[in-house]
Amino acid sequence: TANTASNVLDDYEEGTFTPTFTVASGSLTVHGSHNTLAYTKIGRVVHVQGEVRFSAISSPSGNMSLSLPFAVADLAEGAARFMSSPIGQSGFGGTPDGTIFAKNTNEGTTTIAIQTSVSGDGNDDNVNANQVSTSTELIFTFAYIAA
């Protein structure tokens, strides 16, 4: 009926995507048999989960970011900013002592930063890509509002 139009589910999609990792310099190659994340999009809410492993690294350094299947919404007053639950991880060189998570504070973008709370100063710091090795694996689960 006309008075329920705003409550009607207007988008439902399930799928997978191959994420790309961007680093300040060098490169990270995702393993061919562990290179897919799954997503479910219900309305504007996107749920992402899965495991990625790396098969090749070439002198990566600096901040790491991960691509998303859909752009993050650009809402008023940071309403679309998000942070993932802790990322399951293993195989980091000098494994970070803090919790690793994905965080987006830039609405309207198609990437999220990989960060840690290890610094002890109350701030979140980017995970340096030079800690990634070919034995590193990351297990993600997070949700966000799409544009």
Image (tube, helix red, strand yellow):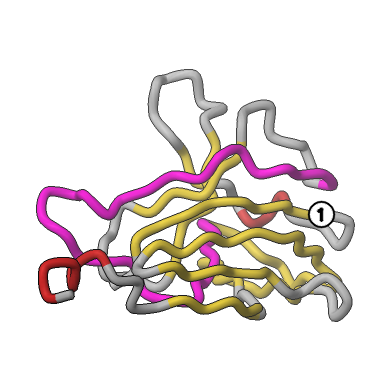
Residue visible at 51% across and 57% down in the picture: 63
| Quarter of the rendering occupied by the C terminus | bottom left
> Which class describes the residues within 10 Å of circle 1: few (<14), some (14-19), or many (20+)?
some
In the displayed structure image, the side of residue 76 where residue 19 appears, left or right: right
Residue visible at 18% across and 73% down in the picture: 5
Is residue 66 depicted above or below 94 in this figure? Answer: below
The residue that label 1 is drawn on is 136
Q: Position of residue 114 (x, y in %)?
A: 54, 51
Which sits in the foreground, 24 or 43?
43
Is residue 16 depicted above or below 125 in this figure? Answer: below
Count of marks, rendered view: 1
| Bounds of the magenta segment | 63-91
Q: Quadrant of residue 62?
A: bottom right
Q: Is residue 109 magenta?
A: no
Residue visible at 16% across and 60% down in the picture: 75
Q: Position of residue 25 (x, y in %)?
A: 56, 70
Residue found at the far front of this picture: 1
Is residue 36 depicted above or below 106 in this figure? Answer: below
